[in-house]
Image (tube, rainbow, N blue to C red):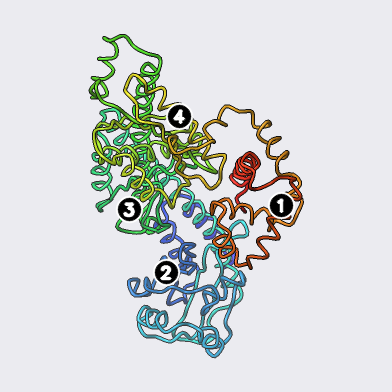
Amino acid sequence: MSHSQNKAEKLLEINKILTQSLKIDEVLHNVIQSASELIEVSDVLIIYLYDENTNTLRFAEGEGVNKEKLKNIHFSPGESISGKVFIDQQSKLFSSEKEIDMYMKNMNKRNYEAYYEGVHKRKIKSAFCVPLINKNRCLGVLVVDNFNQDGVFTEEDMQVIEAVADQSAIAIDNSNVYRSLKEKNALLTQSISIHNQFYNLIIEDGGIDKVLALLETLIHSTVTYHSTLFYEEKGTFFPIVRGKDVLGVLELEKEFESLSNMDQIAIEQASMAIALELIKKNALYEKELHFREEVFNQLLEGLSKEDLQRALHYMQWDETWTAQCIVIEGDRERLWEQNNFIEKEWFVRSIEQITNAVTVHSFLFTRAYQLIIIVPKIKENALEQIIRKIESEWGEKKSILYGIGRETAIGDLSISYKEAVRSVGYAKANENAHIVEYTKLGFERLLQGVDPAEIEMFMQDKLSRLLVLDPTFLKTLNYFIESNKNHKKTAEQLHIHPNTLYYRLRKIEEELKININNEKDWIDLVIATRLFVSGNKKY
């Protein structure tokens, strides 16, 4: 049998050997053994495989080397012989020691020290390197070295190893696929186990504290839960979400991305468990708010003495008390998003904590996008304290309007409620109003039930000729009204000469065909101006 026939048969045998195992360590060992048997003059054989995570070539297997030392090598693509062949994806046979030195000169110091120790401090005389390619993807390289003679390897030697490399690349790829599937299966099994542990806690109504305790046990690290909708974007913060809504945050000791896959899965499962707990608590709180609204509705409709006593017992109120109603509403935006129940609960609970801190007998519920608070008059300035604390807590986050009804007996709460609704309605219609008490409204109270179109016609009838003039005339009139017809004060506020003020006032009288000193004309003018200015922020 000829030498070439012997090598051909050996290659067929190698192909069988390489397909016998899917374990990467066995595959790499078989590749080295096969190459060693085919190239008898080789002193050293090394396989470097590409690591996608580090974007480097790492030592995988070898013969005639110190494996522990070579494990410290991290060749970048393009670095040294292995890196260049990996980039070019072309085999390279070196014709001289000088050419080898030229290819190796860009090896960094750390890699060179590891390599030099790994090959037992010897200098390469002859070498070739072939890429391990499968499906147009380079998986690594196979290096064959001789440390004794120059030009000891031939093109035929390299072609033989190329054939081995082709078979090896397929075997390595299959092994990687097998390992990946095995890892994914193990990951899936562990993930299911973790999921079941958290699921059982939820079924047992373990609560958030037990979920956190289990999570800390699984990841061997401390975790803190923050019940907040607002948080800083940090790697150690993991948001608890439902859809697009943030329900809270888990604060970790280490950045989430730096943790193992299993730790990340545990955190994700804990997050889902906490989300379910929060949603469950939210559903119960929504029921409680709905029940409170029903109790209030019954108070508004009127109850029998027996039913009234039951309602007051639930509210922990005394029938001799008086109370005031506050209606809270968002100015330009709603107090909470339509489908974000957690945001609503967070806001309402916060207001409830504030009211309870001022007076434990406050009664709070929601209606549509309004928050209604009934404050019994058992503590001086309770209402003012509540509003001040709400503004302190939420003033920078939300634009809130307050409508306040009069103090009434419990049996007349419907009156205070209707007044609070009218007051907050006035606040929404007038951009300069923020907190509106019904008792402090002037003629505006009389206009609550008037058709807006009728009000608009009244303003046009009284001011239309003035509105087409320069805006300074309306501004002058408004300041004149605010100063209660004080000429000197009006001129000073407008920074104009008294004669200029006199001219403007005469011009206003001429255009509107009125006399400012006529009581009826003056009253009509004041009402029309106040109505117009209240709806136009620039004045």
Q: What amino acid type is highlighted by mark number 4?
A: Glu
Q: Nearer the viewer, mark 4 or mark 3?
A: 4
Q: What amino acid type is highlighted by mark number 1?
A: Ile
Spatial CA distance of label 2 from label 1 is: 94 Å
In the image, is residue 55 above or below residue 99?
Answer: above
Spatial CA distance of label 3 from label 2 is: 38 Å
Among the two numbered marks 4 and 3 on one chain, the one whose residue lies closer to the N terminus: 3
Q: Which residue is mark 3?
A: 251
Spatial CA distance of label 1 from label 4 is: 37 Å
Spatial CA distance of label 4 from label 3 is: 46 Å
Q: Which residue is mark 1?
A: 508
Q: Are marks 2 and 1 in contact (CB under 8 Å)?
A: no
Looking at the rendering, which quadrant does residue 148 occupy? bottom left
The tag on residue 419 is 4
Q: Which residue is mark 2?
A: 59
Looking at the rendering, which quadrant does residue 380 occupy? top left
Among the two numbered marks 3 and 2 on one chain, the one whose residue lies closer to the N terminus: 2
Among the two numbered marks 1 and 4 on one chain, the one whose residue lies closer to the N terminus: 4
Residue at left offset 25%, top offset 15%: 309
For the residue labelled by badge 2, is the local secondary structure a helix, a strand or a loop?
Answer: strand
Q: What amino acid type is highlighted by mark number 2?
A: Phe
